[in-house]
Image: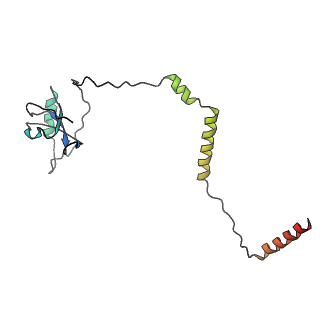
């Protein structure tokens, strides 16, 4: 990223914290006075202009703790870009869905409906409690009698 060169580092500059080459973070800061130490160190990309500079100076009056962090964080409600110096930026076009697209999404083919029903049923099956399986001992005397009777019945057929 190229560094925005300003003739004088004055108040009202908007800069991004830079921790080295390609190390721009998500920390932004606004200058409230002359800051020559920002030159060629941090990425300065904007400037507060007009009457809003007085609102920026009110930030200086905010209460801060011993680490210079504001006790009550300031929130910016809106920003306005006055000049776009880049001619190659294409503005975003927001397209709303037409009624035809909404109708096609709502009307589903019978195959899709059947598939969704199967998936829903499978999900319901997993939510059911597992069936109790009764276990029998192989060594039961009653089971041995039943097996002998079944063997005799098979031989007679």
Q: Is residue 126 above or below residue 51?
A: below
Q: Nearer the viewer, residue 133 or 61?
A: 133
Pick the quarter of the image with the C terminus.
Answer: bottom right
The residue under the point 78% across, 77% down is 141
Q: Report the residue that reaches farthest toward the right.
A: 156
114 sits to left or right of 72: right
The quarter of the displayed image where residue 140 is located? bottom right
The quarter of the displayed image where residue 133 is located? bottom right
97 sits to left or right of 71: right
Residue 15: % across, % down: 18, 37
Q: Nearer the viewer, residue 125 or 59?
A: 125
Residue 79: % across, % down: 24, 29
Pick the quarter of the image with the N terminus.
Answer: top left
Color scheme of the displayed model: rainbow
The quarter of the displayed image where residue 21 is located? top left
The residue under the point 54% across, 30% down is 105
Q: Nearer the viewer, residue 143 or 1?
A: 1
Q: Is residue 130 above or below residue 29?
A: below
The residue under the point 47% across, 25% down is 97
Residue 99: % across, % down: 51, 23
Q: How many marks?
A: 0
Residue 144: % across, % down: 79, 74
Q: Is residue 75 above or below residue 133?
A: above
60 sits to left or right of 153: left
157 sits to left or right of 90: right
């Amino acid at each position: 990223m190229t560094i925005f060169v300003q003739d004088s580092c004055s108040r009202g500059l908007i800069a991004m914290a830079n921790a080295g080459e390609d190390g721009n973070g998500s920390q932004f800061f606004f200058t409230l006075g002359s800051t020559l130490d920002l030159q060629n160190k941090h990425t300065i990309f904007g400037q507060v202009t007009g009457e809003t500079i007085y609102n920026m100076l009110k930030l200086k009056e905010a209460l801060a703790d011993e680490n210079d962090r504001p006790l009550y964080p300031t929130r910016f409600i809106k920003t306005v870009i006055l000049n776009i110096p880049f001619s190659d930026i294409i503005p975003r076009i927001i397209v709303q869905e037409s009624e035809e697209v909404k109708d096609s999404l709502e009307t589903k083919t019978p195959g899709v409906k059947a598939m969704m029903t199967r998936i829903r049923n499978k999900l319901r099956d997993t939510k059911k409690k597992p069936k109790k399986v009764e276990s029998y001992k192989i060594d039961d005397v009653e089971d041995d009698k039943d097996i002998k009777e079944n063997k005799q019945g098979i031989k007679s057929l």
